Image: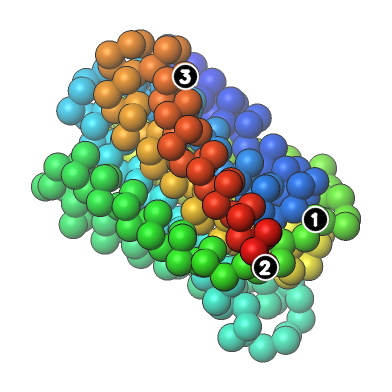
Amino acid sequence: MATMNIFLSAFFAGLVAILATVAIEKYGGVIGGIFGTVPTTIVPAAAFIWIADSNQSSFESSMGMVPVGMLLNSFFLWLWRVIPPIIPEWNFSIRLTIITLINLSFWFSGAIISVILFSELSPMLVGGVALVIGLLFGRLATKRYRPAPRGKNKVGITILSSRGIAAAIAIGIAVWLSQQGSPLLAGIASVFPAIFLTTMVALWISQGEEVPSGAVGPMMLGSMSVSLYALAATVLIPSFGIILGSIFSWLASLIFISIPVAFTLKSNISAS
C-alpha cells in the first residue's frame, strides 16, 4: 500500500505538471504564467502525504514548509531574470547549464537552511509569514510590466515528458519522506522546483530568453496560490476528508490568489 501511494502520487503529479509549459506557450507569459502556477502537483502531494501518515501534527509540519519552499521557488524564478544578463554570451548549452546550476544551488542551500532554522517553530506561523513575503516579493516583481509574448515554436514531446518525469520524481520522494517520519523534508521536497526548472529550460530551448523572462513575474506571484492551498489543506483535508478538503482548498487558492493576480496583471497590461 505504501509503495502504491508513492507510485500514484508520482503518476498524478507528472500528469498534471506537463500542462503549465503548454499554457505559457499557448497563452503567453502573463496568462500562461498564472495558469501554470494554479495548484496542481501539490494536490496529489498533500493528499498522499496525509494518507501516508494521518497525523495532524506531522501534516501541519509538512504543509507549513510548503510556503517556505514556494518562497524559495519565487527567488529561484527571479534568478532566471537576474542571472542571465550577468553570464557572458558563451555557447548556448554551456550558458544555460551554468545559469541552471547557479539557480539550483541557491534553492538547495535555502532549503537546507530553512529545514534547520524552522524545525522548532510553529509550521503554520512560518508558512503564513512565508506566504505574505512571497506575495510582496511577487508583486514587486510584477510592478513594472514586462513583455510576455506567446511562444512561436512548439515545445517538443521529449521536453514535455521530462517535465512530467521530474515533477513525478519530486512528489514521489516527498511522499516517501513523509512515510519515513520526515514531515519537514517531505513538505520542502513536495515543492522542489521541478516544474519551474523544466518550464524555464524548455522555454529557453524552444522559444529563446524573452518568453520565459516575461513569465517570471507572473509565475512568482501566481505561485503563491500553492502556498495558500497548503495552509488551507492543513485544516480542510483533516476536517472534510481528502476529496472535499482538496476541492475546498483548491477553490480557496483560486479565489483568493489566482483570480486576483490575473486581474492585477491584466490591469498592468492595460495601463502599459
Residue underneath mark 3: 247
Q: Are marks 1 and 2 in contact (CB under 8 Å)?
A: no
**Residue 217 placement (x, y as % from top left):** 56, 61
Quadrant of res 38: top right
Considering the numbered disc 2 on the image, is that residue within a helix, a strand or a loop?
A: loop
Residue underneath mark 1: 150
Q: Residues within 10 Å of mark 1 (few under 14, many from 20)?
A: many
Q: Residues within 10 Å of mark 3 (few under 14, many from 20)?
A: some
Considering the numbered disc 1 on the image, is that residue within a helix, a strand or a loop?
A: loop
Q: Are marks 3 and 2 in contact (CB under 8 Å)?
A: no
Residue underneath mark 2: 272
The residue under the point 21% across, 39% down is 124
Looking at the image, tell me whether mark 3 or mark 2 is earlier in sequence order: 3
**Residue 242 placement (x, y as % from top left):** 40, 14
Farthest left residue? 120
Q: Amino acid at mark 2?
A: Ser
- Gap in Å between the C-alphas at discs 3 and 2? 36 Å
Mark yes or no: residue 45 visible.
no
Q: Amino acid at mark 3?
A: Ile
Considering the numbered disc 3 on the image, is that residue within a helix, a strand or a loop?
A: helix
The residue under the point 54% across, 39% down is 259
Q: Residues within 10 Å of mark 2 (few under 14, many from 20)?
A: few
Q: Amino acid at mark 1?
A: Arg
Query: Which image quadrant: the N terminus?
Result: top left
Quadrant of res 15: top right
- Gap in Å between the C-alphas at discs 1 and 2? 18 Å
Query: Which image quadrant: the C terminus?
Result: bottom right
The residue under the point 41% across, 25% down is 249
Mark yes or no: residue 121 visible.
yes
